[in-house]
Amino acid sequence: MAAPTIPHPVRIPAKLYVALSGFMIVISIVSTLQTFPYGDGPDWPALTSSRDPRSGLHILNQRRLEVPAAFYKLLKGCTSILWCVLIPLQHNQALRQRFPAWHRRGGYLATGLSVELGLAGYWMVVRGWTTTHENFFHIHRMYGLSLPGFAWPTFDAALVPLGIFFYSSMVMTIATARRKQFEAHRRWAMIHSSWGYAIAVERALMLALYAAGWLLHALPPAIKHDLLRVPTDYDGKLQAELGALAWSLWIAGIIVTVWIYRQGSGAGIISAWRNSRSVASAKAA
Ligand code: HEM
């Protein structure tokens, strides 16, 4: 049976991938150095840092206390740099057409790195090395409200859907390549890469939050304390920043979902998924 054609050819956001890779490489180098001269201790205004409530240290400095340096530098820092270099190259059409064998090898290397980076991240969760609420099922609330947009689950909880989308799209990327469904393969590769870049989007949001924190700090006390209720006590700051860290990962997930939908068009993604299934069942029959 011939594979049905897929409407709406996918648009690969190549320039954005290069920009996100560049940003992520800077983040990886900074985290690998494990000495961040910013954000430790009680004096920083609320939301201008991401302090771990266990120590009051900025999360990058907190990692130095707990996570074995070799693990962090090698299995997160260096491998993420390699992933960030490989992904834009894999999506480059000219390189793909000129060096198909290298594209194939690069694909296996990139997906191997995806598996490793995710597993290393989950290992950090299992060991309690992440900065998250102690109760996995806790709901963070802004102003104590339970309304959509004001309440969200923990950082570790956000890693569950992230992993599901990241790994299922990776499996589909490999499966469609092996079946030589190249249009679908491009689409799944775009989806998988975009989920990988969720980490970069999250770190960019964190920086934007720091900027917002400094802006809030510059407001008159009547507005920032009485009206907006920005915390001034140490525990209040730590709790606000713990919630902000979780918020940034959930919002990054929403941004990536919308981005994928727009790049591939929703109809295209759904029909790509249906096509892969129908071809697979036709082969099995
Ligand atoms: C299922 C996929 C992934 C999961 C579950 C995951 C999970 C994690 C976790 C839990 C951390 C520690 C965060 C913290 O210190 O608070 C982390 C850090 C990191 N991850 Fe991943 N990760 C995944 C994929 C990736 C990918 C694809 C990249 C590369 C683009 C990457 C790059 C990094 C880097 C550079 C760090 C250290 C710097 C930082 O925390 O900002 N990760 N990851």
Image (spheres, grey):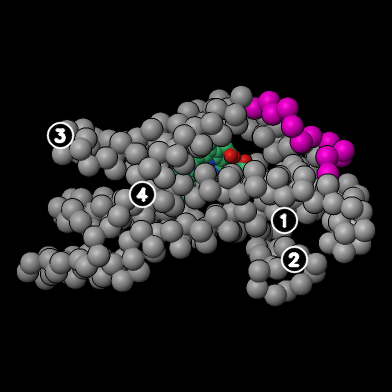
Quarter holding residue 181 = bottom left
Is there a contact, CB below 8 Å, between mark 3 and mark 1?
no
Q: Closer to us: mark 3 or mark 4? A: 4
Q: Quadrant of residue 229?
A: bottom right
Residue stretch rendered in magenta on the structure: 34-45
Tell me the kind of residue under disc 1: Gly
Main SS class of the magenta portion in the image: loop
> Please, which residue is most extreme toward the left here?
1
Q: Does residue 2 lie above or below 165 as drawn?
A: below
Question: Can you see residue 58?
Answer: yes
Mark 3 or 1, closer to the camera: 3
The residue indicated by pointer 2 is 141
Residue 37 included in the magenta stretch of the image: yes
Does the closest atom of ligand 1 sit within 8 Å of the Cβ of label 1?
no
Which residue carries the number 1 mark? Answer: 243
| Residue 98 image position (x, y, % from top left) | 15, 34
Q: CA distance from mark 1 to mark 2?
A: 8 Å
The disc at residue 98 is 3
The CA span between labels 3 and 1 is: 47 Å
